[in-house]
Image: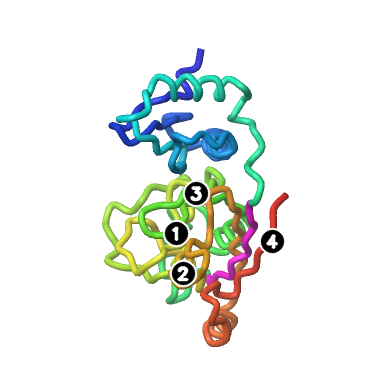
């Protein structure tokens, strides 16, 4: 019998349903799908829901709502289907984000390729055509952790720290890609540069992305990047998007 999923209380703040001990596509799928199912229940005790890489969190005031009653409902819902192979939630979006790879804008592409054991051209070809999912949002407002890339990119973080990479940088480690919200110190390698703002505080929808959305990072030239920078004032950096069914 599997030890997963597990239900735990988080102080008096709510309940955490965890689907695995480590990141995997099925566990992330389960977390996203289960959150959508909880939202559909519209339980009055649940103030808000969110997901991490492999967990779903329900904000519930456990000082006034007995944890046992919520756990019973959650167990019933968990037993209703195989969440690890459940369909992903509706309403997701596929984004195409133009990206410059390497050059002085993203100076760690060659280093990352070397660690991954591929040449830089092969690295660009694979990453620029890999369709990745927003696994979770975190660390900074609107900032996506996306994946999973192939095992080729199961590379560790750097042992040292890069003092700062710019906002909209595309970085890689542990089979994941991140687009940074702000100028940020990091141990992840800076392989691409976009103009795609994942947090637009003046927009009606400040977080551009949501967990479950998918992205492609097609390669563009430095000249194309400079043209987008001059002409695109939307904050999307030339990105286009379409609804996923």
Measured in 3D between alpha carbons, the distance from the residue under mark 1 to the one under mark 4, in whole angstroms, is 19 Å
Give the mark nearest the N terminus, 3 or 4: 3
Measured in 3D between alpha carbons, the distance from the residue under mark 3 to the one under mark 1, in whole angstroms, is 24 Å
Q: Nearer the viewer, mark 3 or mark 4?
A: 4
**Residue 192: image location, x then y, percent:** 49, 67
**Residue at label 1?**
142
Asked if the stretch drawn in magenta spans residue 98, the answer is: yes
Disc number placed over residue 67 in the picture, else none: none
Label 3: few (<14), some (14–19) or many (≥20) C-alpha neighbours in 10 Å: many
**Residue at label 3?**
153
The reply to whether callout 1 and callout 4 are in contact (CB within 8 Å) is no
**Residue at label 4?**
242
Which secondary structure, mark 3? helix
Measured in 3D between alpha carbons, the distance from the residue under mark 2 to the one under mark 4, in whole angstroms, is 19 Å
Asked if the stretch drawn in magenta spans residue 83, the answer is: no
Measured in 3D between alpha carbons, the distance from the residue under mark 2 to the one under mark 1, in whole angstroms, is 9 Å
Residue 31 visible at all? yes
Camera-side residue: 232 or 50? 50
Q: Which residues are magenta?
A: 92-100
Which secondary structure, mark 4? strand
Give the mark nearest the N terminus, 3 or 1: 1
Camera-side residue: 217 or 48? 48
Q: Nearer the viewer, mark 3 or mark 1?
A: 1
Which secondary structure, mark 1? loop
Disc number placed over residue 200 in the picture, else none: 2
In the image, residue 217 sits, relative to residue 42, either above or below, namely below
Label 1: few (<14), some (14–19) or many (≥20) C-alpha neighbours in 10 Å: many
Q: Residue furthest top?
A: 1
């Amino acid at each position: 019998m599997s030890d997963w999923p597990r239900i735990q209380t988080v102080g008096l703040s709510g309940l955490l349903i965890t689907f695995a001990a480590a990141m995997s596509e099925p566990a992330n799928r389960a977390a996203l799908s289960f959150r959508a199912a909880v939202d559909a229940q519209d339980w009055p005790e649940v103030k808000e829901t969110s997901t991490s890489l492999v967990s779903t969190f329900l904000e519930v005031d456990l000082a006034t709502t007995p944890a046992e009653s919520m756990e019973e409902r959650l167990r019933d819902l968990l037993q209703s289907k195989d969440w690890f192979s459940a369909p992903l939630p509706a309403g997701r979006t596929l984004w195409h984000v133009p990206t410059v790879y390497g050059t002085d804008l993203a100076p760690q592409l060659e280093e990352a390729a070397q660690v991954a054991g591929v040449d830089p051209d092969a690295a660009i070809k694979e990453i620029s055509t890999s369709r990745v999912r927003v696994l979770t949002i975190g660390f900074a407002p609107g900032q996506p952790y996306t994946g999973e890339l192939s095992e080729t990119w199961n590379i560790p973080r750097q042992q040292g720290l890069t003092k700062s990479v710019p906002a909209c940088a595309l970085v890689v480690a542990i089979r994941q890609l991140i687009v940074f919200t702000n100028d940020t110190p990091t141990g992840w390698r800076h392989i691409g540069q976009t103009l795609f703002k994942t947090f637009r505080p003046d927009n009606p929808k400040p977080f551009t992305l949501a967990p479950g959305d998918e992205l492609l990072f097609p390669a563009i030239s430095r000249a194309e990047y400079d043209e987008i920078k001059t002409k695109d004032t939307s904050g999307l950096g030339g990105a286009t998007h379409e609804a996923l069914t």
